[in-house]
Amino acid sequence: MQLMRKARLSDVNKIAEMALENSLSQLSEEEKKNNGFLVSGYTKEQYQQYIKDCEHFYVVEKEGELQGFLLGFLDTELNNSKVNQAYKKHAASSFVVIKQICVAKNAQKQGVGKKLYRFFIDTVKQPIYLAVVMEPYNAGSVKFHEKLGFHLFAEITPEDDMKRALFCKN
């Protein structure tokens, strides 16, 4: 049975490992097309800080093994990057941003990501924003978010020169 819960400091090694194995630099072209990927290269120390500071950092585990995580920020927890400024400009009130969602390789295509999203959507009451990298085109992520009811509201090229599609779900 799968358990959804807040991330703990004891989870940080597995979270960092999962993030690395799903980072853009680690995936084959086929994996990039079909599975989605992460571009934010957070360190273990950054994940530790997010576990301590962020209200919305969740994991799903099965039989004691982490299968995935979702890291979300409140609008008040965001820095002033171009992407975050675009969210703030679009939002009519308070909101949350899904910064990362990641599923362990051995748990992909088993509904773990969808379960994390459903839990998150049921937990937060504010509009939810997120960015998907478009170069290289992240087809897996775009399709996944559209199926969950997210809609594209803007495209932007932020400081890292990686074009993003910005999505929202009210």
Image: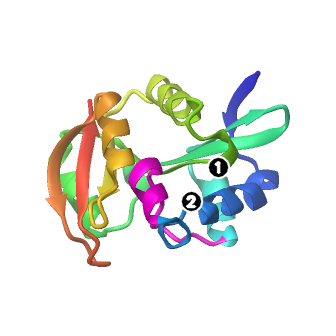
Residue 167 numbered tag: none
Q: Left or right: where does residue 11 sit relative to residue 29?
A: right
Q: Nearer the viewer, residue 159 or 106?
A: 106
Q: Left or right: where does residue 65 sit relative to residue 142?
A: right
Residue at x-position 69% and y-position 69%: 44
Residue at x-position 68% and y-position 62%: 16
Badge 1 vs badge 2, beta-carbon distance below 8 Å: yes
Residue 22 numbered tag: 2
Residue at x-position 20% and y-position 70%: 157
Q: Does residue 42 show up magenta in the picture?
A: yes
Magenta residue span: 29-43
Residue 105 numbered tag: 1
In this rendering, the answer to whether 41 lies above or below 141 is below
Mark 1–mark 2 Cα distance, whole angstroms, equals 8 Å
| Rendering quarter of residue 131 | bottom left
Q: Return the residue found at the far bottom.
A: 160
Q: Secondary structure at mark 1?
A: helix
* Residue type of the residue flagged with mark 1: Lys
Instruction: Measuring from the top left, give residue 46's x and y in whole percent.
Output: 62, 68
Instruction: Measuring from the top left, give residue 104's x and y in whole percent.
Output: 65, 48
* Residue type of the residue flagged with mark 2: Asn
Looking at the rendered image, the quarter that the N terminus falls into is: top right
Q: Secondary structure at mark 2?
A: loop
